[in-house]
Amino acid sequence: MPISIYDPRIMDQVVRVLPVVGGFFRDTFFNTHLPVLGTKVDVDFFKGKRRISAFVNPKSAAKAVEKIGYKTNTFDTPLLKPKDVTTVEDISVRMPGEQLYGGMSREERALMLLTNALADFNDMNNRRVEWMAAQAMLNGTIPVVGEGVNYTIDFNFTNKETLAGAAKWDQNTSDPMKDIDRYVLKCQQNGYHTPNVCLMEYQAFNLFMQRMIALNYLNQISGNLELAVIKPEQLSENVILAGYIKKYNMPIYIYNEWYVDDWTDPANPVEQPLVPAGTVLLGSTNAKAKIYYGEITLADETSPTQFRSVIGEMAAQSWVSKDPAARYLALHSRPLPVPQEVDSWFVSKVY
């Protein structure tokens, strides 16, 4: 019979090592969080025009200005609900790192198991929110695929392109700065915002740097303007500040983060990069974007209706089953990142 490291006979100390939960998309572009009543959110999309006042004769009546309408889209807030089951067997064996003798009581161990599970669920939910924010920004859609659900939230995002042929950044004929100039102009014209954040997948950045050197864009001695500064600096576990595009005072970031895709093929989970190969994104932190959190409904035996509602980002629920003896824990959340100004950023696949 194999020996389990969780068995009381094993004296090895075990340290819980969990991957850091990245939040670049969430914290950069969706730093406004708004809990709402109900499970649906109504989002108004308003887009103005660059109109200028008309000239009129001093003796003429004022010219009426046509009102600009808006479009309201209704979205369902997807439900997240990871659950843990703690049984008598779970609280009867030593926990990782627990002393061999004179350790915790069963009650203390049960509480610690629940605390650890709650922390894990919080990380899982936050990682899903980050994934949703990344999907919204990089693809303009959020696929909601899981047990009993299969639909796509579409924000009608069109500011994207895939470079081909001689324009690809891995070709000696490419000019990344000209591409970035086009992307910025597109955002300024259609989205009314000048991008102030550039995100590059790590290999896309390497190609960008190589082409900038080859084109002498970094060499002031040659007479060219210094269009960019390349000076990589690690900011956090998974974010690198790679440099600046000086023309727009725009920092360049590299974001190395992954997630486990266990819904496309549940029998064969695959770890995927959050930022796909060849991706470059130009975005603005001034554009309107929110993370909405739908209302959470929980069963509650103490309530006259047997239910209670929670308005907030997350809500924990724990209950006990007597036969078989077990304690359950779930962490509910209904998040939905919504970028309201869908023409204010640009995404390109550069190789």
Image (cartoon, helix red, strand yellow):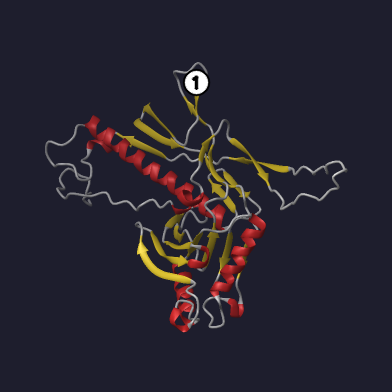
As rendered, which of 339 and 20 lies closer to the eye? Answer: 339
Residue 117 seen in this snapshot? yes
Residue 159 seen in this snapshot? no
Residue 41, quarter of the rendered image: top right
Q: Residue 147, relative to residue 211: is it above or below?
A: above
- Image quadrant holding the C terminus, namely bottom right
* Residue 86 pos. (x, y %): 33, 36
**Which residue does the numbered mark 1 point to in the structure image?**
306
* Residue 236 pos. (x, y %): 35, 56
Q: Tell me the amino acid under the disc marked 1.
A: Gln
Please identify the residue farthest to the left as the structure is shown: 101
Rendered residue at 86%/47% (across/down): 57
As rendered, which of 92 and 193 lies closer to the eye? Answer: 193
Rendered residue at 38%/58% (across/down): 238
Element marked by disc 1: loop
Q: Residue 178, relative to residue 137: is it above or below?
A: below
The reply, left or right, for residue 347 in relation to residue 208 is: right
Residue 213, quarter of the rendered image: bottom left
